[in-house]
Image (cartoon, rainbow, N blue to C red):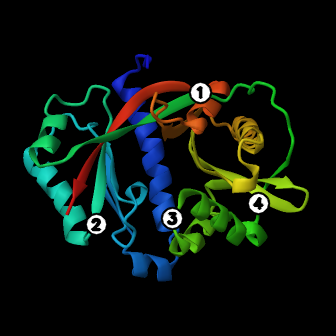
Amino acid sequence: MMVPSISREFAKSLEQTEIAAFRDFYAAAPEKAARKLGVRLIDLEPMCLAVVPGLDILAFNRAVGYGLQDRIDPSDVDRYIEHFRSAGATRFFFQMCPVAAPLNARRELQARGLHWYNNWVKLYRDTSPPPPADQAFEIRLLGRPHALEFGKIVSSAFGWGEDTIDWVAALIGRPQWRVYGAFDGARLVAAGALYIDGSSGWLDFAATVESHRASGAQSGLLTKRINDAAALGIETLVVETAEQTAERSAPSFRNVQRFGFEVAYVRPNFLGKQ
């Protein structure tokens, strides 16, 4: 995969947009879920650690922004790993931003038994009008009456389990989130969210019920979020997807590229365990 050359400062801004969204998502965890699952987000400028030991799901247990430091101190890496292990996280990721990462960033992880697991891809675009797309569904902003349904669609699509439903649902109504739904008649069949971080926006929680996948619902949701982001004064949109490889298809990656998102970099994930 060809990766466009971007500056270290721009890469940092993309990572920080994601971290801001993570920070608000973790802050949204209802008290009952936070207590049961052990939800924590640890800010370690310029990176953060998302820790949820009650969920053996890597998306919830990861270090974001690793590699943005001017230098990697081995004792800091020990401390980062200890945060996960002392909290009881069964597995965890270190997601290394590869743009101008210090030379020893990868080596320090591997020396501690973490190994490369897979890659995710960070993409971005401006908020110029998206390409035309068939509008097969009604796309509209969701309010609290649809919060629980939104939580169920996302948690089911990603296999996160029932303990995350109320947590995901809690995003609706938070000031910096806009959550959208695709409706087939009166039925909510897909959803996607936009987090507003100043002049940047983070796209996340794109999920579709099984019966309506590959039907154009996510294209409609992308169109709506891009257009609304422009109206809100957002200049750059950021998203992350799985990597498209010969062995694994990544529909979300192909879809966002159709909508003008460019690859910023491929971000390697290093897996750690207890």
Mark pair 2, 1: CA separation: 33 Å
Q: Point out the tag, 3 or 2, that comes first from the N-terminus.
A: 2
| Mark 4 surroundings within 10 Å by alpha-carbon count, few (fewer than 14), some (14 through 19), many (20 or more) | many
Q: Name the residue tied to disc 2.
A: 89
Q: Point out the tag, 3 or 4, that comes first from the N-terminus.
A: 4
Q: Point out the tag, 3 or 1, that comes first from the N-terminus.
A: 3
Closer to us: mark 3 or mark 4?
A: 3
Q: Position of residue 143 (x, y in %)?
A: 76, 65
Q: Is residue 260 above or below residue 89?
A: above
Q: Name the residue tied to disc 1.
A: 261
Mark pair 3, 1: CA separation: 27 Å
Q: Quarter-wise, where is residue 198 in the image?
A: top right
Q: Is residue 68 left or right of residue 274?
A: right
Q: Amino acid at mark 2?
A: Ala
Q: Amino acid at mark 3?
A: Trp
Badge 4 marks a residue whose secondary structure is loop
Q: Residue at x 29, y 56 (%)?
A: 92
Q: Residue at x 46, y 34 (%)?
A: 243
Closer to us: mark 4 or mark 2?
A: 2
Assign the N terminus to one quadrant of the image: top left
Determine which of the numbered discs, if any, sits on residue 160 in the image.
Answer: 3
Badge 2 marks a residue whose secondary structure is loop
Q: Amino acid at mark 1?
A: Phe
- Between 160 and 79, the one lying in front of the other is 160
Determine which of the numbered discs, if any, sits on residue 142 in the image.
Answer: 4
